[in-house]
Image (cartoon, grey):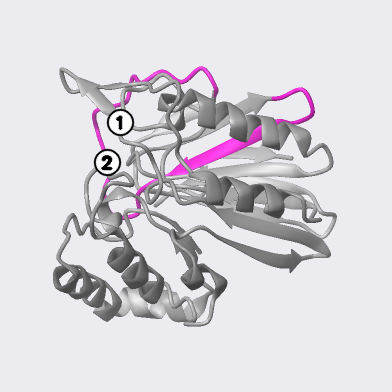
């Protein structure tokens, strides 16, 4: 299970309040049973970071980071705890296929976003990841695997909606796409959340096609975007409760599924 942020709604710089909210989530029987049944990894987004649409100026980000890692059960001696930020990577082997999961921190180092009349303004020179995380990401991408999965809070490919997105930082978005384009031997899947909707986006690059599965949420959705456009979308947008699923078969084929609760499946893509 991969958390992609807004794992709880904290919106606080008081670490005692934040801890109580994590404790409440962990004390929920259904969640405790769920956590015991599978491995759980993840990264944060704004509401568990501590402030709506939060960025690197948040004063309590170090303490919040530590509590988020505690919530996810990250060991005290894990590499991520020895540096700033929450970015991590994990390696797995499924059916003989080596899979690397990279979780990017889009909050701790991110430049602020300006608003004019409450509308986000793109920052042509703004950065999302920060120098240290970019350097780490380039090192991670140089490692050998068959499938690369990159998860982060806000959407990476879609660029038409009015909410937070990587497209508000075009320099960072292009830098990431350039890095992915250089990975000619690997399949790449992007994962995102944040939107309270579900959709699959498809981005053709010169060396490969990159898919992004946006899935959120399991407990509540957003009804105001049923006509939202996304030129990269394949299939349809869902406003129902949903989750994403990646299935790897013995023949090393990969299926992406965006599943609505109460229905078997919504959108399927086979790589």
Tell me where residue 29 appears, x and y as whole percent. Answer: 29, 80
Tell me where residue 203 appears, x and y as whole percent. Answer: 63, 26
Q: How many marks?
A: 2
235 vs 215, left or right, is right
Tell me where residue 143 appears, x and y as whole percent. Answer: 77, 55
Task: State the residue position of label 1.
Answer: 113
Q: Nearer the viewer, mark 2 or mark 1?
A: 1
Q: Main secondary structure of the magenta part?
A: loop
184 vs 200, left or right, is right
150 vs 160, left or right, is right
- Looking at the image, is mark 2 or mark 1 earlier in the sequence? 2
Q: Residue at x 36, y 43 (%)?
A: 194
In the figure, residue 190 lies in which quadrant? top right
Tell me where residue 246 appears, x and y as whole percent. Answer: 62, 52
Give yes or no for contact between labels 2 and 1 (Cβ–Cβ under 8 Å).
Answer: yes
Circle 2 residues within 10 Å: few <14, some 14–19, many ≥20: some
Which numbered dot is residue 53?
2
| Residues shaded magenta | 205-232
Q: Residue at x 68, y 30 (%)?
A: 178
Q: Nearer the viewer, residue 76 or 213?
A: 76
Q: Residue at x 17, y 23 (%)?
A: 118
* 202 in magenta: no
């Amino acid at each position: 299970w991969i958390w992609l942020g807004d794992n709880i709604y904290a919106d606080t710089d008081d670490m005692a309040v934040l801890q109580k909210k994590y404790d409440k989530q962990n004390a929920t029987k259904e969640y405790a049973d769920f956590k015991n049944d599978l491995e759980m990894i993840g990264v944060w987004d704004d509401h568990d970071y501590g402030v709506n649409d939060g960025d690197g100026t948040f004063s309590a980000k170090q303490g919040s980071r530590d509590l988020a890692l505690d919530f996810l059960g990250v060991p005290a001696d894990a590499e991520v705890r020895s540096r700033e930020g929450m970015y991590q990577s994990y390696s797995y082997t499924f059916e003989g296929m080596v899979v690397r999961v990279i979780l990017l921190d889009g909050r701790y180092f991110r430049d602020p976003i300006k608003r004019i009349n409450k509308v986000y303004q793109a920052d042509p020179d703004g950065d999302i990841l920060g120098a240290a995380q970019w350097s780490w990401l380039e090192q991670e991408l140089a490692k050998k695997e068959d499938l690369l999965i990159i998860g982060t809070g806000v959407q990476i490919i879609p660029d038409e909606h009015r909410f937070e997105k990587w497209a508000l930082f075009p320099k960072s978005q292009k830098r990431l796409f350039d890095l992915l384009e250089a990975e000619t031997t690997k399949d790449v899947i992007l994962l995102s959340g944040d939107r309270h909707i579900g959709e699959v986006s498809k981005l053709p690059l010169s060396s490969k096609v990159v898919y992004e599965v946006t899935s959120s949420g399991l407990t509540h959705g957003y009804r105001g975007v049923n006509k939202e456009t996304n030129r990269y979308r394949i299939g349809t947008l869902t406003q129902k409760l949903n989750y994403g699923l990646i299935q790897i078969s013995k023949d090393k084929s990969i299926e992406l599924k965006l599943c609505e609760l109460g229905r078997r499946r919504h959108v399927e893509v086979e790589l």
